[in-house]
């Protein structure tokens, strides 16, 4: 018998490595057991989300007869949305601009705010970032040159109602026109919140599904709206099931703002259902770091634990998130929530959006303030969705500053110049 050079007793890498540290390792193990080592990971029991102190105060003050269990119920949140000037005034002191905007607007985007999101608003300050995103002002009634109701030309790229087919391999499926909370800068304000679009109809869905089924180039379906996660589990599952039966549909994505405005919707029964339909991705509409409450963080934990890759989409908004510090805080918060910053959008020229839009140079300045100063994972792609239907066009600050002979001249994030040998042709020629 050949003698082994290394007996099994000799080859005990784990044992020999751990033995000298046994005491410390055991202490760490008991600490792990007894402590919440990661404050960003919240409980994933279905007993409800951990309420932040501000939310508890708000609930007790303005909804004193509401139990915590009712507050945690997403259907209660939807039934009790704040939708009128009177209901708003019961909670916040409206400015004259806000009051006039709500009272005079008969045909525009409706007002609706979940009680939960309302609890994040400043009750006295009309300039607070979150408040400006959901409480209208008369500035919405001003129409500036270049604005339109359908700036992205979605209606022209719609082969069947409720479906936009612009890019070769993917479609946008507008499954509902209903949102729990309406954003005042919504690109689809022409259709969301309107009775005729809010109710999803089976005949529309069937036509859209038939189109996808008969179009083999479609390998990626983005469910959006309105907000798909305001539908019941059964309706969402109906769509996912039908789509999964189409062999050429490889990826399904859901676009939603629900984890920010209605985190109670992210129940464990929802995530258990969603995980059956992988590969499933979720793009979250994220506006401001104040949205990242403990409730929202728990919602993201549940989605990420269900194996759903999460990305964010943020609209650049004047006076709301258009400074480097706010945007960096938002991106860092999203990273902690396991949401990869995906797109930063230049605000679309939707009718009445002038007060929200920033110069493009502001977006470039923000990207310049992120790139290099934080991990590349936290830097979204800044895009303009081209008016008229040209699709997303990425914008980046100019880091190539010229050439010198065979060298390319580059500027790094601190402004220093570097040369890269590029003898086979300048990209500038
Ligand atoms: S959640 Fe999206 S679809 Fe709904 S109002 Fe906001 S931007 Fe529009």
Image (cartoon, rainbow, N blue to C red):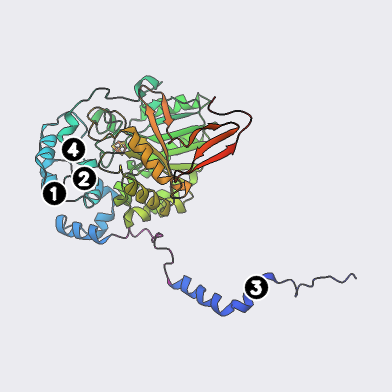
Say few, some or many: other residues with alpha carbon within 10 Å of mark 1 (under 14 / 14 to 19 / 20 or more).
Answer: some
Query: Helix or strand or loop: what does disc 2 sit on?
Result: helix
Q: What is the x, y in percent for residue 153?
A: 35, 22
Q: Is residue 167 left or right of residue 175?
A: right
- Which stretch did the figure color magenta? 35-51
Q: In this view, does 182 lie to the left or right of 420?
A: left
Q: Is mark 4 within 8 Å of ligand 1?
A: no
CA separation, marks 3 and 4? 63 Å
CA separation, marks 2 and 4? 9 Å
Say few, some or many: other residues with alpha carbon within 10 Å of mark 3 (under 14 / 14 to 19 / 20 or more).
Answer: few
Badge nearest the viewer, 3 or 1: 3
Q: What is the x, y in percent for residue 30?
A: 49, 75
Check the picture and name the quadrant holding the C terminus.
top right
CA separation, marks 3 and 2? 56 Å
Question: Where does label 4 land, which residue?
Answer: 136
Q: Do the residues labelled 1 and 2 touch (CB within 8 Å)?
A: yes
User: Which residue occupies the foreground of this view, 137 or 52?
Assistant: 137
Question: Where does label 2 land, which residue?
Answer: 131
Question: Where does label 3 land, which residue?
Answer: 17
Residue 310 against residue 358 in the figure, above or below = below
Instruction: First in sequence, mark 3 or 4: give its number.
Output: 3
CA separation, marks 3 and 1? 62 Å
Q: Which residue is drawn at 22% across and 44% down?
A: 113
Question: Where does label 1 land, which residue?
Answer: 92
Instruction: First in sequence, mark 3 or 1: give its number.
Output: 3
């Amino acid at each position: 018998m050949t003698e082994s050079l290394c007996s099994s007793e000799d080859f005990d890498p784990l044992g020999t490595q751990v033995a000298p540290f046994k005491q410390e390792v055991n202490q760490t193990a008991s600490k792990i057991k007894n402590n919440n080592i990661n404050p960003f990971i919240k409980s994933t029991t279905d007993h409800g989300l951990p309420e932040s102190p501000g939310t508890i105060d708000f609930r007790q003050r303005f909804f004193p007869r509401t139990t915590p269990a009712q507050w945690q119920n997403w259907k209660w949140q939807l039934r009790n949305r704040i939708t009128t000037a009177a209901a708003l005034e019961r909670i916040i002191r409206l400015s004259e601009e806000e009051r006039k905007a709500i009272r005079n607007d008969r045909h525009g985007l409706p007002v609706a705010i979940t009680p939960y999101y309302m609890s994040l608003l400043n009750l006295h300050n009309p300039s607070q970032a979150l408040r400006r995103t959901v409480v209208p002002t008369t500035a919405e009634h001003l129409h500036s040159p270049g604005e339109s109701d359908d700036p992205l030309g979605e209606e022209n790229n719609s082969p069947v109602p409720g479906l936009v087919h612009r890019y070769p391999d993917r479609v946008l499926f507008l499954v509902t026109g209903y949102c729990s909370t309406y954003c005042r800068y919504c690109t689809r304000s022409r259709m969301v919140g309107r009775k005729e679009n809010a109710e999803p109809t089976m005949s529309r869905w069937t036509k859209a599904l038939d189109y996808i089924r008969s179009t083999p180039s479609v390998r990626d379906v983005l469910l959006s709206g309105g907000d798909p996660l305001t539908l019941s589990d059964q309706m969402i599952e109906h769509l996912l099931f039908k789509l999964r039966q189409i062999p050429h549909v490889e990826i399904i994505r859901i676009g939603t703002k629900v984890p920010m405005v209605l985190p109670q919707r992210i129940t464990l029964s929802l995530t258990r259902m969603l995980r059956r339909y992988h590969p499933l991705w979720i793009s979250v509409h994220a506006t401001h770091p104040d949205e990242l409450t403990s409730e929202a963080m728990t919602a993201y934990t549940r989605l990420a634990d269900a194996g759903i890759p999460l990305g964010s989409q943020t609209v650049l908004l004047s006076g709301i998130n258009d400074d480097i510090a706010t945007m960096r805080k938002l991106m860092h918060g999203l990273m902690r929530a396991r949401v990869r910053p995906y797109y930063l959008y230049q605000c679309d020229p939707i009718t009445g959006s002038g007060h929200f839009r920033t110069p493009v140079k502001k977006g470039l300045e923000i990207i310049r303030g992120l790139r290099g100063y934080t991990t590349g994972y936290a830097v979204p792609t800044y895009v303009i969705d081209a008016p008229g239907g040209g699709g997303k066009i990425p914008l980046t600050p100019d880091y190539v500053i010229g050439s010198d002979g065979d060298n390319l001249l580059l500027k790094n994030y601190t402004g220093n110049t570097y040369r890269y040998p590029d003898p086979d042709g300048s990209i500038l020629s």
